[in-house]
Amino acid sequence: MNEGAPGNDLEVLLDTETLDRRIAELGREISADYRGRPLRLVGILKGSWVFMASLARRLELEVTVDFLGVASYERSTEPTGAVRITKDLDHSIEGLDVLVVEDILDTGRTFEYILGVLSAHRPRSLKTVTLLDKPSRRVRPVKADYVGFTVPDVFVVGYGLDYAQRFRHLPDVRIFRPA
Ligand code: IMP
Ligand code: MG
Protein backbone atom coordinates (compact mmCIF):
# COMPACT_ATOMS: atom_id res chain seq x y z
CA MET A 1 0.00 0.00 0.00
CA ASN A 2 1.16 3.53 -0.77
CA GLU A 3 2.18 5.20 2.48
CA GLY A 4 2.62 8.53 0.75
CA ALA A 5 4.20 9.98 3.83
CA PRO A 6 7.83 9.20 4.46
CA GLY A 7 8.96 10.78 7.72
CA ASN A 8 5.44 11.34 8.98
CA ASP A 9 3.66 9.02 11.36
CA LEU A 10 0.06 8.68 10.16
CA GLU A 11 -2.21 6.77 12.51
CA VAL A 12 -5.32 5.26 10.90
CA LEU A 13 -8.50 6.75 12.38
CA LEU A 14 -11.08 5.26 9.96
CA ASP A 15 -10.13 2.22 7.92
CA THR A 16 -11.49 1.41 4.46
CA GLU A 17 -14.07 -1.12 5.71
CA THR A 18 -15.46 1.31 8.27
CA LEU A 19 -15.68 4.02 5.60
CA ASP A 20 -17.36 1.71 3.07
CA ARG A 21 -19.91 0.47 5.58
CA ARG A 22 -20.93 3.93 6.79
CA ILE A 23 -21.09 5.40 3.28
CA ALA A 24 -23.37 2.53 2.21
CA GLU A 25 -25.64 3.40 5.16
CA LEU A 26 -25.67 7.07 4.20
CA GLY A 27 -26.53 6.04 0.64
CA ARG A 28 -29.55 4.06 1.84
CA GLU A 29 -30.73 6.87 4.09
CA ILE A 30 -30.39 9.57 1.41
CA SER A 31 -31.99 7.32 -1.23
CA ALA A 32 -34.99 6.80 1.06
CA ASP A 33 -35.31 10.52 1.84
CA TYR A 34 -35.30 11.59 -1.84
CA ARG A 35 -37.15 8.57 -3.22
CA GLY A 36 -38.59 9.27 -6.68
CA ARG A 37 -36.93 12.70 -6.97
CA PRO A 38 -33.87 13.49 -9.09
CA LEU A 39 -30.93 14.72 -7.02
CA ARG A 40 -28.11 17.09 -7.96
CA LEU A 41 -24.93 16.42 -6.01
CA VAL A 42 -22.64 19.44 -5.64
CA GLY A 43 -19.19 18.37 -4.49
CA ILE A 44 -16.89 20.89 -2.86
CA LEU A 45 -13.44 20.61 -4.43
CA LYS A 46 -11.07 19.32 -3.86
CA GLY A 47 -11.59 17.49 -0.58
CA SER A 48 -14.96 15.88 -1.36
CA TRP A 49 -13.82 14.15 -4.52
CA VAL A 50 -13.21 10.66 -3.11
CA PHE A 51 -16.23 10.67 -0.76
CA MET A 52 -18.51 11.94 -3.52
CA ALA A 53 -17.45 9.13 -5.86
CA SER A 54 -18.17 6.57 -3.14
CA LEU A 55 -21.48 8.08 -2.05
CA ALA A 56 -22.83 8.63 -5.57
CA ARG A 57 -22.40 4.94 -6.35
CA ARG A 58 -24.53 4.07 -3.30
CA LEU A 59 -27.49 6.23 -4.32
CA GLU A 60 -30.50 4.55 -5.88
CA LEU A 61 -31.78 7.76 -7.40
CA GLU A 62 -31.55 9.71 -10.63
CA VAL A 63 -28.32 11.55 -9.81
CA THR A 64 -26.47 14.34 -11.61
CA VAL A 65 -23.23 15.88 -10.40
CA ASP A 66 -21.51 19.24 -10.40
CA PHE A 67 -18.60 20.75 -8.49
CA LEU A 68 -17.87 23.99 -6.71
CA GLY A 69 -14.24 24.83 -6.05
CA VAL A 70 -13.54 26.51 -2.73
CA ALA A 71 -10.24 27.29 -1.05
CA SER A 72 -10.00 27.95 2.66
CA TYR A 73 -6.68 26.69 3.91
CA GLU A 74 -3.26 27.78 2.63
CA ARG A 75 -0.48 25.34 3.50
CA SER A 76 -1.46 25.13 7.12
CA THR A 77 -3.55 23.15 9.58
CA GLU A 78 -5.13 26.36 10.88
CA PRO A 79 -7.96 28.17 9.08
CA THR A 80 -7.26 31.70 7.88
CA GLY A 81 -10.97 32.47 7.96
CA ALA A 82 -10.90 33.49 4.32
CA VAL A 83 -12.97 31.46 1.84
CA ARG A 84 -12.97 32.01 -1.91
CA ILE A 85 -14.49 30.37 -4.99
CA THR A 86 -11.90 28.80 -7.27
CA LYS A 87 -14.40 27.11 -9.64
CA ASP A 88 -18.05 28.01 -10.19
CA LEU A 89 -20.86 25.54 -10.91
CA ASP A 90 -21.14 24.43 -14.54
CA HIS A 91 -24.95 24.09 -14.47
CA SER A 92 -27.84 26.02 -12.94
CA ILE A 93 -29.35 24.57 -9.76
CA GLU A 94 -32.52 26.67 -9.89
CA GLY A 95 -35.55 24.57 -8.95
CA LEU A 96 -33.49 21.44 -8.21
CA ASP A 97 -33.10 19.29 -5.11
CA VAL A 98 -29.44 19.91 -4.24
CA LEU A 99 -27.23 17.98 -1.85
CA VAL A 100 -23.88 19.62 -1.07
CA VAL A 101 -21.13 17.05 -0.51
CA GLU A 102 -18.27 18.11 1.77
CA ASP A 103 -15.24 16.30 3.18
CA ILE A 104 -15.19 17.81 6.66
CA LEU A 105 -17.15 20.38 8.63
CA ASP A 106 -14.70 22.15 10.93
CA THR A 107 -15.20 25.79 11.96
CA GLY A 108 -18.25 26.00 9.69
CA ARG A 109 -17.00 29.05 7.77
CA THR A 110 -16.83 27.21 4.45
CA PHE A 111 -20.33 25.72 4.83
CA GLU A 112 -21.85 29.03 5.82
CA TYR A 113 -20.28 30.73 2.81
CA ILE A 114 -21.25 27.96 0.37
CA LEU A 115 -24.83 27.76 1.60
CA GLY A 116 -25.18 31.52 1.14
CA VAL A 117 -23.85 31.35 -2.42
CA LEU A 118 -25.94 28.31 -3.42
CA SER A 119 -29.23 29.42 -1.87
CA ALA A 120 -29.00 32.64 -3.92
CA HIS A 121 -29.38 30.39 -6.98
CA ARG A 122 -32.83 29.32 -5.73
CA PRO A 123 -32.69 25.52 -5.60
CA ARG A 124 -35.92 23.70 -4.75
CA SER A 125 -34.20 22.32 -1.66
CA LEU A 126 -30.68 22.53 -0.28
CA LYS A 127 -29.22 19.95 2.08
CA THR A 128 -25.72 18.97 3.10
CA VAL A 129 -23.76 15.80 3.70
CA THR A 130 -20.28 15.73 5.20
CA LEU A 131 -18.08 12.69 5.58
CA LEU A 132 -16.54 14.05 8.79
CA ASP A 133 -17.72 16.48 11.43
CA LYS A 134 -15.45 18.15 14.00
CA PRO A 135 -18.09 19.91 16.15
CA SER A 136 -15.58 20.91 18.84
CA ARG A 137 -14.06 23.47 16.46
CA ARG A 138 -17.26 25.16 15.29
CA VAL A 139 -17.31 28.97 15.29
CA ARG A 140 -20.30 29.43 12.93
CA PRO A 141 -23.83 28.12 13.73
CA VAL A 142 -24.07 25.52 10.96
CA LYS A 143 -24.59 21.76 10.92
CA ALA A 144 -24.88 19.13 8.22
CA ASP A 145 -28.10 17.24 7.46
CA TYR A 146 -26.14 13.99 7.07
CA VAL A 147 -22.87 13.18 8.86
CA GLY A 148 -20.65 10.18 8.20
CA PHE A 149 -18.49 10.31 11.32
CA THR A 150 -17.96 12.71 14.20
CA VAL A 151 -14.22 13.07 14.80
CA PRO A 152 -12.19 14.57 17.66
CA ASP A 153 -10.12 17.74 17.33
CA VAL A 154 -7.27 16.23 15.33
CA PHE A 155 -6.03 17.08 11.84
CA VAL A 156 -6.97 14.30 9.44
CA VAL A 157 -5.76 13.42 5.95
CA GLY A 158 -6.58 10.83 3.30
CA TYR A 159 -9.77 9.85 1.45
CA GLY A 160 -9.64 13.23 -0.32
CA LEU A 161 -8.44 15.31 2.64
CA ASP A 162 -5.07 17.00 2.41
CA TYR A 163 -2.30 18.67 4.30
CA ALA A 164 -0.79 21.28 1.93
CA GLN A 165 -2.26 19.27 -1.01
CA ARG A 166 -0.60 16.03 0.14
CA PHE A 167 -2.14 12.69 1.18
CA ARG A 168 -5.47 13.04 -0.68
CA HIS A 169 -4.96 9.65 -2.32
CA LEU A 170 -4.68 7.61 0.88
CA PRO A 171 -7.49 5.00 0.98
CA ASP A 172 -8.40 5.64 4.64
CA VAL A 173 -8.61 8.56 7.06
CA ARG A 174 -5.48 9.12 9.14
CA ILE A 175 -4.35 11.50 11.84
CA PHE A 176 -1.63 13.91 10.74
CA ARG A 177 0.72 15.35 13.33
CA PRO A 178 3.24 17.78 11.86
CA ALA A 179 6.77 16.62 12.65
P1 IMP B 1 -14.22 25.07 7.88
O1 IMP B 1 -14.51 26.21 6.96
O2 IMP B 1 -13.34 25.49 9.02
O3 IMP B 1 -15.43 24.33 8.34
O4 IMP B 1 -13.26 24.09 7.13
C1 IMP B 1 -13.69 23.28 6.16
C2 IMP B 1 -12.54 22.94 5.26
O5 IMP B 1 -11.27 23.01 5.93
C3 IMP B 1 -12.69 21.52 4.79
O6 IMP B 1 -13.42 21.47 3.60
C4 IMP B 1 -11.26 21.10 4.61
O7 IMP B 1 -10.82 21.43 3.32
C5 IMP B 1 -10.48 21.90 5.62
N1 IMP B 1 -10.21 21.12 6.84
C6 IMP B 1 -10.73 21.30 8.06
N2 IMP B 1 -10.27 20.41 8.94
C7 IMP B 1 -9.43 19.61 8.24
C8 IMP B 1 -8.65 18.45 8.58
O8 IMP B 1 -8.61 17.95 9.72
N3 IMP B 1 -7.92 17.91 7.57
C9 IMP B 1 -7.91 18.40 6.31
N4 IMP B 1 -8.65 19.46 5.94
C10 IMP B 1 -9.40 20.07 6.90
MG1 MG C 1 -12.35 21.23 1.65
Image (cartoon, rainbow, N blue to C red):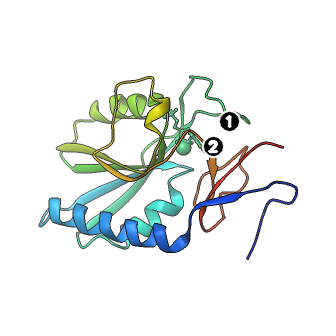
Residue found farthest to the left: 36
Q: Which mark is residue 53?
A: none
* Relative image position of residue 65 (x, y in whole percent): 37, 59
* Relative image position of residue 147 (x, y in whole percent): 36, 51
User: Residue at the location (58% across, 33% down)?
Assistant: 72
User: Could you tell me which secondary element the residue under label 1 belongs to?
Assistant: loop
Proximity of marks 2 and 1: CB atoms separated by less than 8 Å: yes
Whether residue 93 appears in this view of the structure is no
Left or right of 129, for residue 7: right
* Relative image position of residue 86 (x, y in whole percent): 56, 38
Q: Which mark is residue 155?
A: 2
How many C-alpha atoms fall within 10 Å of the one at disc 2: few (<14), some, or many (≥20)? some
Vertical position of residue 174 compared to residue 178: above or below: below
Q: Of residues 167 and 83, which is closer to you in this image?
A: 167
Whether residue 137 appears in this view of the structure is yes
Image quadrant in which you'd find residue 25: bottom left
User: Residue at the location (54% across, 71% down)?
Assistant: 16
Image quadrant in which you'd find residue 31: bottom left
* Relative image position of residue 60 (x, y in whole percent): 24, 73
The numbered mark, 2 or 1, whose residue comes first in the sequence reads 1
The quadrant in which the N terminus is found is bottom right
For the residues marked 2 and 1, what is the alpha-carbon distance in whole angstroms? 7 Å
Q: Which mark is residue 77?
A: 1
Q: Is mark 2 within 8 Å of ligand 1?
A: yes
How many C-alpha atoms fall within 10 Å of the one at disc 1: few (<14), some, or many (≥20)? some
Q: Is mark 1 within 8 Å of ligand 1?
A: yes
User: Residue at the location (47% across, 41% down)?
Assistant: 88
The kind of residue on which mark 1 rests is: Thr
Q: Quadrant of ligand 1?
A: top right
User: Could you tell me which secondary element the residue under label 2 belongs to?
Assistant: loop
